[in-house]
Image (tube, grey):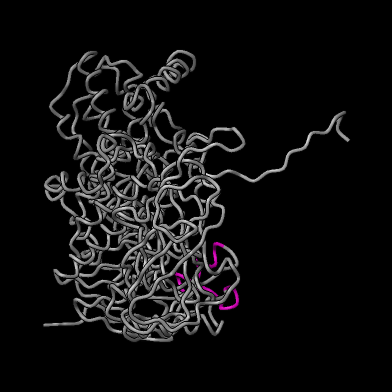
Amino acid sequence: MAFQTLNPLPAISGLARHRYLIAQLTRRDVLLKYRGSFLGIGWSFFYPLLLLAAFGLVFGHILGTRWPQNAESGLPLVLVMYAGLIVYNFFSEVASAAPRFILGYQSLIKKNVFPTEVLPVVLTMSATIHAAINAALLLAAVAVFGKLHAAVLLVPVVFLPAWLLALGVAWFLAAAGIFVRDIIQVIPVLMQVLLFLSPVFYPVSAVPDFLRWMYDFSPLTALMEDFRRVCLWGQMPQWDRWAVMMLVGLAVALAGLALFRKGQEEFADAL
Amino acid sequence: MNTTAISVKDVSKAYRIYDGPLGRLRHLFGLGSPGTRREFPALRGIGFEVAKGERVGIIGRNGSGKSTLLQLICGIMRPSAGSIVVNGRVSALLELGSGFHPEFTGRENVFLQAAVLGLAHSEIEERLDDIRAFADIDEFFDRPVKTYSSGMFVRLAFSVAAQVIPDVLVVDEALSVGDMTFQKKCTRRMEELCASGATVLLVSHDLHLIERFCDRALVLDRGRCLCDASAAEATMFYLNLVREGSLQAPEHDAAAGPEQLYATGEASLLEVRTLDARGQPRDVFVTGEDIIVAARYRAHGPLRRLSFGCSVWAGVDARVGTASLRFEGSGPCEKELDGEFEVRMTLAAVPLLPGTYSLRGGIYDENLLHACCLWGWTGKPKGVFTIASSTVNGFVLKESLGFVMLPSRWEVREGGHE
């Protein structure tokens, strides 16, 4: 029994079988966010633009942040920050929404024969679509202000570990949020902290040595760096770190799925 | 070939009530101390088997464990003990439209609900026209569901659900909503599914439906299965329990609302006429006259201890009023009736205002749980009569005044309020 719950293969093939359902639910989740608003999906990049304008002002002009790696590309500093923000937003959107995501689908779960484990996938897919829209906008800006490199083609590859990591976190938090509702309150605060502890608005090189270990361990650091390398600077990803991140991502995803499936038995009772 | 569709073996389900949210987590990982939780038993030692193609009803009052049992069979929850094996694809109609989102159009919701029910994109596209026709909501199909009336909502939801062809169909009271035409559509659809070999598990308070539709029924009470027999025997068993007072009967409308569509057919209506005070057939009256409703029936076997009801309707959906033998305080009819008989009801000094009215009525058992015969509820209106325009003390009564002239006393007091 224990092995059955932990063996991920049936669960993964089940997810593949439900891909149409996942697509439908994702579509709904993406549309729902903006339904009824005037700008519609435009908010998906309008919001980060506003944020960037503010942060660009504060960090670029008031605090005078310098970004050595960006020196030769000639791209505006704001785009470098934007690239980091895309990765951060993707992750934060998934983590913040996950603990209450399942609560939003209660009626589906309690009144239908419904594969609950697809819901965190839906959340991750919907965040991926937002990230993709933003990445397209970023690349358009790069093409305008500088030069688009062939390395851009590696964006999906670079994103893959982040995607697996987010998925694993989504499975874990979605299950945990049902049992301990406090998590719903805690995660947004943690995400705020994560924003300032990630190299979004400053380069890792600006971090003092005694704090550097934190950035070496943070999964987001490697992702942001690699994302910038391929999108902005036309460099190859750091493959050794990518490989490690890939393993971490896979491990987190499988662990998240296993924990989710363990908790699933109690969902209908706990809701 | 396996001929068992559902096999339930010694199943119990206890809802655990924890003292704190962490209690559930601790228990999940085997760290809980038994003192931190209480258990509420919803089902105790239930066991039965359902053969393929069988239609099984489940009866019981609220809280008897019916819905829990269905949820376990659907795999929404897991039993605390025992095992449940279901062979084949299960489709659950536990709540219609549970996946609908009010902000989306009918069309969008159809695609999502169908995906939840396990249909592929091509299957839905193929059947979209059927769904649309079945739901019968015209241009509302492309409007947000939040603009729907509850009737349209349910119709659309059912028309999606009806597209799924399951091996096992589980229905929980889902069909007790909606109007008569819709309910008939639902029953017809279930019958079609059965004809194609599907197994049906049906929970309902509607004993007529259970008796008519199911081969077999279970009676649940306080989590135990008290009776597993033919539908007729099981409904009798349940009725006896109700009579003995050991169970609470579900509430029933005294003169049978449209929710009670299913009569046993122990008697049938031959003719219903309206007569004037002298017993002459007439269908035009004026306000304040006596009206006699004469209904002739044929009983298909001896009937005892009957109760009667009749209601007056304006159009198809305005119920003007109801008359019932029970209102009059007399007990059931003590005559033993067989063959043809006539029931005459006199409405004295009918205060109906001008307009055209129709009648619906029926014969019930003394507890009004069972209808032997119902008439006027579907199809062509019966007992149609007209109240013609007349004058009362020089005042001309018109249709626009409503249905009933309300008896009143008037007084005028001079000066301020006391």
Q: Would residue B153 be found to the left or right of residue B285 on screen?
A: left
**Image quadrant in which the N terminus of chain B is located:** bottom left
Relative vertical location of residue B71 with respect to residue A97 in this rendering, above or below: below
- Coordinates of residue B159 in the picture (x, y in percent): 24, 51
Residue B65 part of the magenta-drawn span: no
Q: Would residue B308 be found to the left or right of residue A128 on screen?
A: right
- Coordinates of residue A158 in the picture (x, y in percent): 22, 39
Q: Would residue B201 be found to the left or right of residue B330 on screen?
A: left
Q: Residue at x 44, y 81 (%)?
A: B238
Q: Residue at x 39, y 51 (%)?
A: B283
Q: Overall secondary structure of the magenta stretch?
A: helix
Total labels drawn: 0
Chain part drawn in magenta: B21-37
- Name the one closer to the observer, B173 or B84: B173
- Coordinates of residue B243 in the picture (x, y in percent): 52, 82
**Image quadrant in which the C terminus of chain B is located:** top right
- Name the one closer to the observer, A245 or B87: B87
Q: Would residue B82 be found to the left or right of residue B312 on screen?
A: left
- Name the one closer to the observer, A9 or B348: B348
Relative vertical location of residue A92 with respect to residue A111 in this rendering, above or below: above
- Name the one closer to the observer, B82 or B187: B187
**Which quarter of the picture shows residue B175?**
bottom left
Q: Is residue B268 visible?
A: yes
